[in-house]
Amino acid sequence: MGKVYLIGAGPGAPGLYTLRAKEILEQADYVVYDYLANDVFLEWIKPGCRVKYAGKKGGDHTLTQDQINELLVDLAREYEIVVRLKGGDPYVFGRGGEEAEFLVENGIEFEVVPGVSSAIAAPAYAGIPLTHRDFSSSVTFVTGHEAADKDRSVLDWKSLARSASTLVFFMGVKNLPIITKKLMEAGLLPDKPAALVRWGTTCKQRTIVSTISMIAEDSIKYNITPPALLVVGDVVGLRDRLSWFEKRPLIGKTVVITRSRSQASELASRLREKGACCVEFPTIEIEPIEGNIELHNEIEKISSYDWIIFTSVNGVDLFFKDLFSLGKDSRALYKVKICAIGPATEKRVRHFSINPDLVPKKYIAEGIVESLRQMGIEGKDILIPRAKEARDVLPIELEKSGARVKVVPVYKTVIGDGDPQGVIEKIKARGIDYISFTSSSTVKNFFSLVSKEILLEYGDEVRFACIGPVTAKTLKGFGFEPHIIPNEYTIPALVKAIERDACK
């Protein structure tokens, strides 16, 4: 017998997932997840973990609740750790109680991992405190389904209308006219402030503020569809002063990230912090050169080199991996000067307790060569561990300056495992605002996966962001003009450049 964990995935923002939930998810053998559970969480599961979508939205049920209950029992009899990943909190209108009861009836061990409820998080992200001593000292959570599902409501509408509570209705958009009508019939003043928060805490969050008499009409006017929460009470009036999340510069903007899956996290994290929706579409993956005899040979005679030039984080990691595999450590480089191209590469070199002797201010070949010339490289021996597919401009220019250069490939880039169909559909639906490219390889592989005709036909509003001029030149070769090239060719600068463009 295995164990089932009923885990609350929170309201959607990855940062609101609990540490306990992440700990269990990383150990899971099987995950059954809901519509409102962010797919980003599935990136934390271990290799070999199986997943099944059991979402329910707007009457479209992948599985009925009874089928989900049976599924959890069956899985617990086959797998050791089974996760039921539910949006929000399992026990707050999540039917987690029913699932727990069924597990008990069938002798299955279970554990509940509470989640941050959308009822708390969405209003907070919308700038609406649920309690405030000047306006409300209590909160009432109500299911918005109840009014439509029952001939005779069990809700005490008069008590709800007369209380000083802030009212929060889950899943109430469909029944909004009924809810507002019953509240006003029960005595709630028509001008009572009300707000709808759609996709709270996510990059798609959108809030409208109205009154209880107008909110149903306004929801149609502004096309507010599920999932959304209805908040009723005087605290809604604080939104004008306390709104913060929807002021982020990239809120609602969708950015495609074409970096490798292992390197996409920094760019995605920075973009999400600005409010962007990120579509991770890894067009490249990094593959080490296995059994790299050539690199082994150069490491064995490393003290004969005057300089090592690291052009990427990958080059640093794979060089030191081979160095350590040969029984050596950073002390083997005591005679060698180190050049690191770019702040990220510099940071990675420092990770190995080495302070680079040179970090050129310009991250293109010409700038690097000029910086090295000033330090005197004529007659010097230089090792460059780098990608197999990299441009030859740097070694050629160094050799023109009198240096002896040895280039050793330590990795190669191959086409990534991104889903082109998903991106194509978003482009066709005009749901993409930016496509970011961080290397020439990402450009080439993107267009090997997505036909440029798709962009020519549907991508008239898509803007291209390239990390530097070399990447931009590659993009131009496919017939597209880059809209964004930061002055500094780094991930932080690229994000700032996208932000500036969005704020124009």
Image (spheres, rainbow, N blue to C red):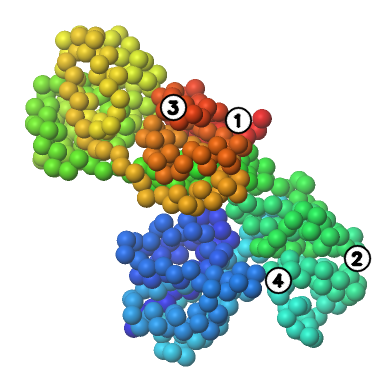
Residue displayed at 74% across by 68% down: 174
Between circles 1 and 4, the one closer to the viewer is 1
- The amino acid on which the numbered mark 2 sits, given as a three-letter code, is Leu
Q: Label 2: state its secondary structure.
A: loop
Quadrant in the rendering for residue 182: bottom right
Q: Residues within 10 Å of mark 1 (few under 14, many from 20)?
A: few
Mark 3 vs mark 4, CA separation in Å: 57 Å
The reply to whether dot 3 and dot 4 touch (C-beta < 8 Å) is no
Between circles 3 and 4, the one closer to the viewer is 3
- The amino acid on which the numbered mark 1 sits, given as a three-letter code, is Arg
The answer to whether any part of residue 264 appears in the image is no
Q: Residues within 10 Å of mark 2 (few under 14, many from 20)?
A: some
- The amino acid on which the numbered mark 4 sits, given as a three-letter code, is Phe
**Exactly how many numbered labels are in the figure?**
4
Tell me the quarter of the image containing the C terminus.
top right
Between circles 3 and 1, the one closer to the viewer is 3
- Label drawn at residue 500: 1
Q: Residues within 10 Å of mark 3 (few under 14, many from 20)?
A: few
Return the disc, 3 or 4, that comes first in the chain's sequence.
4
The answer to whether any part of residue 304 appears in the image is yes
Q: Would you say 467 lies left or right of 299 here?
A: right
Label 3: which residue?
477
Q: Where is residue 43 in the image (x, y as percent from the top left)?
A: 41, 56
Label 2: which residue?
189
Residue displayed at 26% across by 38% down: 412
